[in-house]
Amino acid sequence: NSLSISPTTAIQSPLQIFVRAKKRINDIYGEVEQYVSDSCKFLSALPKDSDLITKEELVVVNSHVEKVKGIREVLSRDHMKVAFFGRTSNGKSTVINSMLRERILPSGIGHTTNCFIQVEKSENDESYLISEDSIEKKNVKSVSQLAHSLCTGSLGDSALVRVYWPTDKCPLLRDDVVLVDSPGIDVSPNLDSWIDRHCLDADVFVLVANSESTLMLTEKNFFFKVSARLSKPNVFVLNNRWDASASEPEYLEEVRRQHMLRTVDFLVDELKVCGTRTEAEQRVFFVSAKEVLQARTNEFKGLPLNTGIVTDGFHGRYFEFQDFERKFEECISKSAVRTKFDQHTKRGKAVVGDARNVMEVLLERASAKRAAKSQSRREVLDHLDFTEKQLQLVTVEMKDKICKMVEEVEHKVSKALND
Ligand code: GTP
Ligand code: MG
């Protein structure tokens, strides 16, 4: 993946922290897999009657092969997940479309999104969706087609539809970010099941609030539930529809201050997900997703960003959205590396440690066996030495005796002959 990214993007995007870490840990797991399968082959080839390894030890090492294969599979699917929540019509789907630089998700006035929609990269450059109630891949070429597919389904509001989208226009998807859109939190009684099903593995949460009103109790309560299940979730707050402030410039600064104060109070004192007010201020943004999406659509067509009707303060809001994206990317890549790869590192260490223990025990047993063998060989050699010497002695003695006997016989024979 990182090969297809130009060097400048590679340096600029904080998402590369995750992309590089994933490549590195994948390479390491390649080596671990080789080591474990080599160990397995070696141990299985030992003579059955050698007493060097027990059946249990062999089972342990064999199980490592499957374990490592499993971890590598999970690793290949690991991604950075961001989930968007907020009241209906606050602009969740529009924010996601702006970040993806393309109008993928249906958005509009009224209650639009009626189930969870997860957008992730398509491996084969085709756009399609898979819903929870079937394994069928449905082609999706346009946002209206997607809206139609979602309407005809009889899915509940906790159900998940996965949309696979080509990465050519969406750098976020290319870098393994998965974006999850949700229905408005004010229109569902199933918030607990939402959290169970969609929030526990999220790396970052984005609360899309409406800057035309204020943070609502439903929004706060949902995040209280989330933080009761996850320790210190990463939460960003987007005060969306900030373009509306342009029509009341005299109150702009005051309203901004009021929103900031309340949101920071919420993050620091109530939710306790930020340690300091300065830290919390870095998590709050005033944006207009609608403007950003329009600007990016223009950019794609080669037109200037601000073609069409431009509301006062557009550039400031556009930069603030970019600032949000940058801080979000930093946060999500660091958090995902920590939560995802920390587990893999621990499990990898345990597998290698186990395999090493078995090999060490084997080595000890083999050394003891060799020492015992060389001891008995030395004893046999000593014995042979002794026998040889004895034989030599015996031979010399026998020779002398035989000589003497021959001499005696000779003597007796010659005496007899003489007589
Ligand atoms: P549900 O899916 O129904 O929960 O709504 P949502 O939160 O996904 O909102 P959606 O993105 O569908 O936007 C609702 C309406 O608000 C659409 O008509 C958008 O064009 C409009 N909208 C979104 N963001 C902005 C914004 O920043 N400014 C203005 N003026 N309108 C916006
Ligand atoms: Mg929506």
Image (cartoon, rainbow, N blue to C red):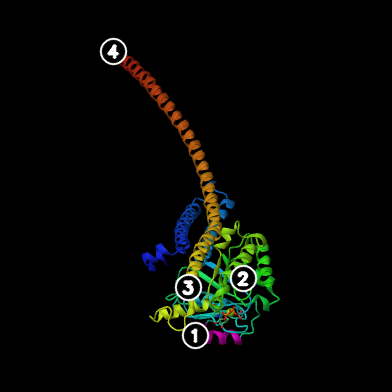
Residue 418 badge = 4
Query: Under 8 Å from ligand 1: the CB of mark 1?
Result: no
Q: CA distance from mark 2 to mark 3?
A: 30 Å
Q: CA distance from mark 1 to mark 3?
A: 26 Å
The residue wearing badge 3 is 318
Which comes sooner in the sequence, label 1 or label 2?
1
Dot 3: few (<14), some (14–19), or many (≥20) neighbours within 10 Å? many
Residue 142 badge = 1
Which comes sooner in the sequence, label 4 or label 1?
1
Taken as a whole, is the magenta stretch helix, strand or loop? helix
Along the line of sight, which residue is nearer the eye, 381 or 391? 381
Q: Is residue 154 left or right of residue 252?
A: right
Q: In this view, which residue lies farthest toward the front?
A: 250
Question: What is the three-letter code of the residue carrying label 3?
Answer: Tyr
Q: Is residue 145 magenta?
A: yes
Which comes sooner in the sequence, label 1 or label 3?
1
Q: CA distance from mark 2 to mark 4?
A: 127 Å
